[in-house]
Amino acid sequence: MKTVYERPKVLTDEYMKYCGGCGHGIINKLIAEIIEEENLAEKAIMIWPIGCSVYADRYFNVDSVCALHGRAPATGTGIKRALEDNLVVVYQGDGDMVSEGMAEIMHAGIRGEKFTVVFVNNAIYGMTGGQMAPTTLMEQKTSTSPQGRSADNAGFPVNMAEIIGSLHGCHYSERVAVNSPANIRKTKEAIRKAFKYQLDGKGLSFVEIVSPCPTGWGVSPVKALDWIGETVLNQYPLGVFKAPKEGE
Amino acid sequence: MNRVTINEEICKECEYCITFCPKKTILKKKDTLNKKGYYPAIAENLEDCIACGICATVCPEAAIKVEKDV
Ligand SMILES: Cc1ncc(C[n+]2csc(CCOP(=O)(O)OP(=O)(O)O)c2C)c(N)n1
Ligand code: SF4
Ligand code: SF4
Ligand code: SF4
């Protein structure tokens, strides 16, 4: 028998607290697979955010820190500057990054910090009960926008992969999604590339991942994946927004 | 015969594996609950399985092991 797939050993046996079908589970798993395949377990330092992934240090057999809400890029800055040979991975949700910690991520990009950001955009605050985030789509119903998001009172969604990609300090920025087997594979390759750029000493590498929150969206997991393909990707198109030039 | 092993105790019944498996005869929901209260996915009719690994790729719990008969 040849093993086609088995659970990466970088993941512990801890029961993950995510809801059924949550994109965090898929993304955590992909990061663990890459760390294992690239033999990075000794080098990796994960910086976890406040949000549903706050317990993820328990799921990984690698060094981890949990940052204050929105401040993972600041924590990452300190750690990466002190330990430049390590692989520092800053993991953030959209509430964490785009409302609470917008200044931190912007300045990390402006300064060209040399770590990787894995940005999980599920267009909502998952952990606290499905409130509207800056990334919530127009007309999207949430617990704090029961009539749907309106521009009058809540403005417009924020496209982080484009914004971060526009900064000189950013080396690589791509948006991917985990809504199908093919897109999950592409997400893995985007994260792998970002890790490689970091290990080559390049500036900020940023991967935005459009991810399902079935509980916050009030739909089944399979419907949540459908909704990403039919609706969410219209606001958040997939693509590379900062591509290193040949040889860079 | 190829082998698909599902850790039923950590499965959360998201149905991603069932939805994306290219063969409709293999994966289905068990009719009894696991300890956490989910109807976990189970694999049967493995003679139809092509060991493509898609079920494992989409599983958020990393609950699926796929082995190819070589
Ligand atoms: C300073 C501070 N303000 C607010 C909160 C409450 N809080 C916890 S998680 C969260 C939002 C998380 O949303 P997101 O970053 O989108 O992550 P998700 O849970 O969706 O993965 C908020 C507002 C907090 N813990 N600390
Ligand atoms: S609330 Fe949403 S983001 Fe949080 S664990 Fe559940 S599905 Fe995932
Ligand atoms: S390996 Fe492929 S064919 Fe076999 S059960 Fe999984 S998805 Fe279906
Ligand atoms: S994908 Fe994983 S968690 Fe979802 S139903 Fe299948 S085995 Fe269970």
Image (cartoon, grey):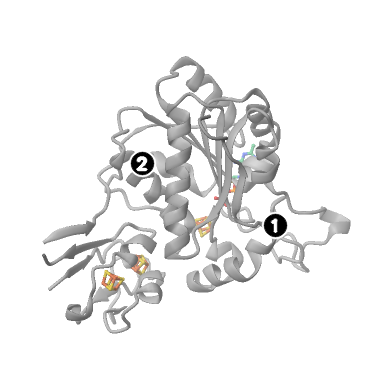
Q: Earlier in the sequence, mark 1 or mark 2?
A: 2
Secondary structure at badge 1 equals: loop
* Numbered label attached to residue A58: 2
Q: Can you say whether A177 is above or below A225 in the image?
A: above
Examine the rendering and report whether any part of residue B11 can be seen.
no
| Left or right of A135 in this view: B49 | left
Kindly indicate the quadrant of the structure image that contains residue B45: bottom left
- The residue located at (47%, 29%) in the rendering is A198
- In the rendered image, residue A75, in percent from the top left (x then y), is placed at 54, 26
Specify few, some or many for label 1: CA neighbours under 10 Å numbering under 14, 14-19, or 20 or more: many
Q: Can you say whether A203 is above or below B11 in the image?
A: above
| Left or right of B61 in this view: A204 | right
Secondary structure at badge 2 equals: helix
Outermost residue to the top: A82
- The residue located at (64%, 46%) in the rendering is A95
Examine the rendering and report whether any part of residue B14 can be seen.
yes
Outermost residue to the right: A152
Three-letter amino acid code at the position of disc 1 = Thr
What chain does mark 1 sit on?
A
* Numbered label attached to residue A136: 1
Q: Can you say whether A244 is above or below A9 in the image?
A: above
Three-letter amino acid code at the position of disc 2 = Arg
Q: Can you tell which of label 1 and label 2 is closer to the viewer?
A: 1
* Numbered label attached to residue B6: none
- In the rendered image, residue A179, in percent from the top left (x then y), is placed at 50, 64
CB of mark 1 within 8 Å of CB of mark 2? Answer: no
Label 2 CB, ligand 2: below 8 Å? no
